[in-house]
Image (spheres, grey):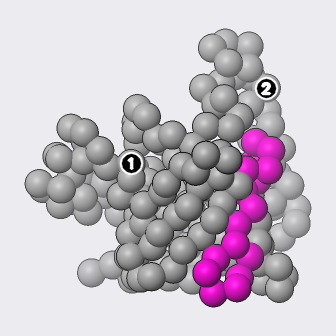
Amino acid sequence: MSQYREVQYTDELLSDRSVHRRFADGREEWRRRSGDRYVQWQDNSGRSGVDEVLGDRIIKRTYTTGQVVYGRDQGYGRTAWGDGTLTVNRTSFGGRTGAILAAVGAGALLGAIVAPPLLMTEFEEEELRRQAQQQQSSSDGGDGGGDDGGSWSDDGDDGGSDDDFG
């Protein structure tokens, strides 16, 4: 049995290129990209903050209160958070992949959840940022790296990182 509380969500791309995220537990978030590695968000309970992709599938969520929670992208729209939540993007489970996962149970095919770090030092965070920057630099010479810098679509879900930062 998983130690995580699963919360499913769907994303709706709005006309201003922001995203309205609806969670199955009644929460809602409004999200807007702020550069390649950051997403600013606010929710319907008055909380807000910034999500940052550090690298190596680690996401740093910083609340405006200063609280920090780390997440780890598990692939296929799943993110495990240090607070014991597993968010699952139902938006990305369309088409043939979604039908297969729904039919056999996603957990059986997707494997074990890799826990996110509970705490990181500033040095560890910087090292992940540096590694991610090196990977981005090396991929820029080929096919453009695959990220258009502003797309929220989940077209072509390949099991990698969703562009929504958890």
Q: Is residue 78 left or right of residue 28?
A: left
**Rendered location of residue 125, percent (x, y):** 81, 60
Badge number at residue 137: 2
Q: Residue at x 44, y 54 (%)?
A: 77
Q: Is residue 127 above or below residue 118?
A: above
**Secondary element at tag 2:** helix
Nearest the viewer among 43 and 132 is 43
Q: Amino acid at mark 2?
A: Ser
Residue 134 is drawn in which quadrant?
top right
User: Could you give the CA–CA distance between mark 1 and mark 2, rounded to whole angstroms?
Assistant: 27 Å
Other residues around mark 1 within 10 Å, as few (<14) / some (14–19) / many (≥20): many
Q: Residue 56: in sight, yes or no?
A: no
Residue 42 located within the stretch drawn in magenta: yes
Could you tell me residue 8's position as x and y percent?
Answer: 38, 69
Q: Which residues are magenta?
A: 33-48
Residue 157 position within the rendered picture, expressed as x and y whole percent measured from the top left: 40, 38
Q: Earlier in the sequence, mark 1 or mark 2?
A: 1
Q: Residues within 10 Å of mark 2 (few under 14, many from 20)?
A: few
Q: Residue at x 60, y 26 (%)?
A: 146
Give the answer, above or below, for where 166 lies relative to 23: above
Query: What label sits on residue 54 in the rendered view?
Result: none
Q: Is residue 157 visible?
A: yes
The answer to whether the residues at label 1 and label 2 have Cβ atoms under 8 Å apart is: no
Dividing the image into 4 quarters, which one contains the C terminus?
Answer: bottom right
Place residue 29 in its image quadrant. Answer: bottom right
Q: Which mark is residue 92?
A: 1
Kindly report which numbered mark, 1 or 2, lies closer to the viewer in this rendering: 1
The quarter of the image holding the N terminus is bottom left
Q: Which amino acid lies under the numbered mark 1 shown in the image of this protein?
A: Ser
Q: Which residue ends up furthest to the front in the rendered image? A: 15
Numbered disc 1: secondary structure: loop
Q: Residue at x 78, y 83 (%)?
A: 67
